[in-house]
Image (cartoon, rainbow, N blue to C red):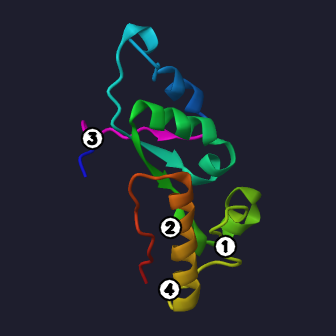
């Protein structure tokens, strides 16, 4: 996988508008500077709820993207205190344990299906470290 210049902006609710302004349909971008952006990283929960137009814009501009589902958070009980992470289609019902192979398998499958539904260009495989 060639990431171009190696900088992958992480797009979420805080910066998606600014990133979109830097990606014009034709011609120069923001401040009359062309933006070379072969890859971007989209935050998973944001992309699921609000990312449709940003994803389409990236497709139109030929920009590949990864989706950061923040899978590592699902081992921590604090993750389940708010809606942002529990409302995702891949969220388990309780914190993941490294020795619960069935729950891990279901989580990984749902996580990858979500990335596929968003049209991700490549995937990080979620896993755990005991």
Instruction: Bin the neighbour count of mark 1 within 10 Å (Cα to Cα): few under 14, some 14-19, many 20 and up.
Output: few
Q: Which mark is residue 77?
A: 1
- Residue beneath disc 4: 98
Mark 4 or 2 closer to N-term?
A: 4
Residue 95 position in % (x across, y down): 64, 78
Tell me whether the residue at label 4 lies in contact with that at label 3, contact meaning CB atoms closer than 8 angstroms: no
Pick out the residue farthest to the top. 32
Image-quadrant location for residue 93: bottom right
Label 4: how many Cα within 10 Å (few below 14, some 14–19, many 20+): few
Q: CA distance from mark 1 to mark 2?
A: 22 Å
| Disc on the earlier residue, 2 or 3 | 3
Question: Residue, x 61% and y 35% (percent of image)?
Answer: 53
Q: CA distance from mark 1 to mark 3?
A: 33 Å
Single out the mark in the foreground, 1 or 2.
2
Which element type, helix, strand or loop, lies under badge 2?
helix
Label 1 or label 4, whichever comes before in sequence order: 1
Of callouts 1 and 2, the N-terminal one: 1
Q: Which of these two is toward me, 60 or 84?
A: 60
Q: How many residues crowd around disc 3 within 10 Å: few (fewer than 14), some, or many (20 or more)?
A: few
- Against 46, is 27 above or below? above
Tell me the distance, in whole angstroms, between the alpha carbons under discs 4 and 3: 32 Å
Q: How many labels were placed on the picture?
A: 4
Residue located beneath label 2 in the image: 112
Above or below 30: residue 99? below
Residue at the spot of label 3: 6
Q: Position of residue 92 (x, y in %)?
A: 66, 75
Q: Secondary structure at mark 3?
A: loop
């Amino acid at each position: 996988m060639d990431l171009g210049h190696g900088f992958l902006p992480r797009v979420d609710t805080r910066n998606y508008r600014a990133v979109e302004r830097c990606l014009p349909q034709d011609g120069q971008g923001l401040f009359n500077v062309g933006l070379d952006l072969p890859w971007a990283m989209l935050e998973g929960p944001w992309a699921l709820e609000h990312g449709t137009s940003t994803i389409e814009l990236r497709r139109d501009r030929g920009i590949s993207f990864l989706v950061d589902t923040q899978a590592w958070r699902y081992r921590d009980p604090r993750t389940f205190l708010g809606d942002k992470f529990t409302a995702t289609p891949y969220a388990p019902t309780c914190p993941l344990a490294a020795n619960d192979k069935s729950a891990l398998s279901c989580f990984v499958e749902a996580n990858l299906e979500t990335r596929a539904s968003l049209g991700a260009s490549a995937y990080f495989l979620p896993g755990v470290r005991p």
